[in-house]
Amino acid sequence: MSIVRRSGRRAGGGCPKVAFSYTYLHIFLADTGEQVLVDVEDKTNKEIMEHVKKILGKSKETLEKEEKERKKLSHPATFGPKKYHLRECMCEIEGQVPCPAFVPLPKEMRGKYKATMKNEASA
């Protein structure tokens, strides 16, 4: 989106009493190719920004919903694909057992070892 501010004063027919002025924003929307003209005569910059947000922006409900989803997905307790979460695996959290895909688990933590020890103790 590009914004061009234009203002000027034209006299019609050479008669100074028929003079008029115009002030507007000419907004080009690059993704859709649309052009929007916004009249900004006698408006403050805050009024102009609010008007442009109202016309072209998202509603407050949509913004709040997106923010809530963003906070929910970026919560440090969740993990999954990097596209949606901060961590892919529980082992990335400091103080957790390292991932068995990279570092072998101690024998005492493996089910196969526990079963073997249980069988040896009962035999």
Image: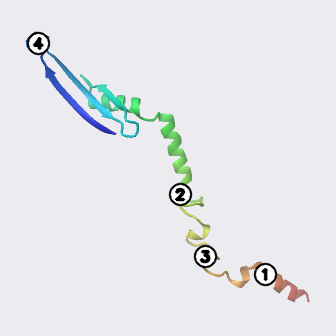
Q: From mark 4 to mark 1, how far is it between C-alphas?
A: 98 Å
Which residue is disc 3 drawn over?
98
Q: Tell me the quadrant of the picture where the C terminus can be found.
A: bottom right
What residue is shown at x 27% (from left), y 31% (from top)? 45
Callout 2 amino acid? Lys
Local packing at callout 2 (Cα closer than 10 Å; few below 14, some 14-19, many 20+) is few
**Picture coordinates of residue 120 (x, y %)?**
86, 89
Residue 103 drawn above or below residue 3? below
Which residue is disc 2 drawn over?
83
Q: Earlier in the sequence, mark 3 or mark 4?
A: 4
Local packing at callout 3 (Cα closer than 10 Å; few below 14, some 14-19, many 20+) is some
Residue 80 drawn above or below residue 26? below
Which of the numbered marks, if any, corresponds to residue 13?
Answer: 4
Callout 3 amino acid? Pro
Secondary structure beneath dot 2 equals loop
State which mark lies toward you, 4 or 2: 4
**Picture coordinates of residue 87 (x, y %)?**
55, 63
State which mark lies toward you, 3 or 4: 4
State which mark lies toward you, 1 or 2: 2
Q: Nearer the viewer, residue 55 or 29?
A: 29
What residue is shown at x 10% (from left), y 10% (from top)? 17
What residue is shown at x 50% (from left), y 45% (from top)? 67
Q: From mark 3 to mark 2, how far is it between C-alphas?
A: 22 Å
Secondary structure beneath dot 1 equals helix
